[in-house]
Image: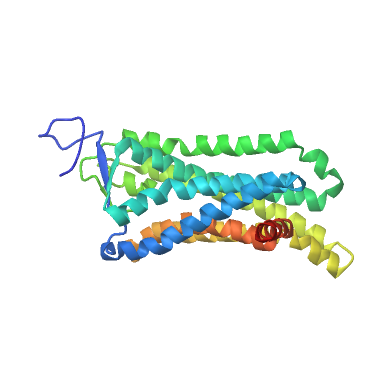
Amino acid sequence: MLGWSGGDSNTTNFTNPSTFILLGIPGLEAAHVWISIPFCTMYIIAILGNFTILFIVKRESSLHVPMYYFLCMLAVTDLCLSTSILPKTLSIFWFNSREIDFSACLTQMYFLHCFTVMGSGIFVAMAFDRYVAICHPLRHSTILTNPVVAKMGLAVVLCSGMLVMPHPVLARRWPYCRTNIIPHTHCEHMAVVKLACADISVSSYYGLFMVFCGLSLDGIFITVSYIQILRAIFSLPTKDARLKTFGTCGSHLCAISAFYISALFSSLTYRFGQSVPLYFHVFMANMYRLVPPMLNPIIYGVRTKQIRDRLLRLFTHKGM
């Protein structure tokens, strides 16, 4: 039975569905419990890894510099992003708890897209930090002061919040009269608004605009930063100096690749892969929001010497 609030029972136009029904991964319902194992494992790794990054940076005063402040912002964003979808997904897989309140669905939609855009903005801030550190090393401490870092972080949060806000606002306006069944594990924007019995062109076009502004422009800024960084690196006199300087960017580049490659692949398959099975779309949408939060602390833990050394020292002291 479909749950709706408002409207007469003889009409077909309802503007406020009381609940939506999340199907999980359509076509793979029988395998939900098995699929939950890697999903839960990735979530646990993401939680432990990102909390470890936060703990190490907080504990080590030598890491209280812009690069690690931005890394902490990324860790918090990754924790919030994965938490915005996975608890509900696991409740579907484990307990068949498919209902989600209409307002809760729009709230989830807002936060999962907000934290996605926020992650992209933080990568831009990290690229700017690397640009200043390599191209203007003597001015790094005067350009990226703590107040400037705080203002950059606040700007990323506010811009992300305002950019994503039209998604749930528009989604609440549409009339829903066909069904309240969402063939997804979470309230992804297009999966929800496609249920509306109205012209959703505004939502669709704004979604494309947001992808362009939130991801494409960020990608351009990061590319420009690294072009300048590479020019500065190749102007160094020795090969060792070039490798050592480029090594400070290695973690950032790996994390950016994990984020943007998964985002691009998910977006392209969703919008242009009409022949791709629905379960693949849903699966990739989950991977897009679970893999980067899991990989980022691993990448920075393995490739960043300062964090690796502190982590080894922490476990060594505990083992003694």
Where on the picture, by quarter, is residue 36? bottom left
Would residue 227 be visible to someone looking at this image?
yes
- Residue at the bottom extreme, as displayed: 239
From the viewer's perspective, is 314 left or right of 91? Answer: right
Q: Position of residue 40 (x, y in %)?
A: 42, 58
- Residue at the left extreme, as displayed: 10
Number of callouts: 0
Q: Position of residue 58 (x, y in %)?
A: 67, 44
In the depicted view, which residue is nearer to us: 42 or 119?
42
Q: Position of residue 117 (x, y in %)?
A: 53, 45
In the depicted view, which residue is nearer to us: 44 or 18?
44
Look at 26% across and 36% down and name the residue there. 175
Q: How is the image coloured?
A: rainbow
Q: Quadrant of the C terminus?
A: bottom right
Would residue 272 be visible to someone looking at this image?
no
Q: Position of residue 137 (x, y in %)?
A: 84, 49
Q: Can you say whether 285 is above or below 58 in the image?
A: below
Look at 82% across and 39% down and name the residue there. 142
Q: Quadrant of the N terminus?
A: top left
- Residue at the front extreme, as displayed: 320
Look at 76% across and 60% down and name the residue there. 230
In the depicted view, which residue is nearer to us: 209 or 103?
103
Where on the picture, by quarter, is residue 275? bottom left
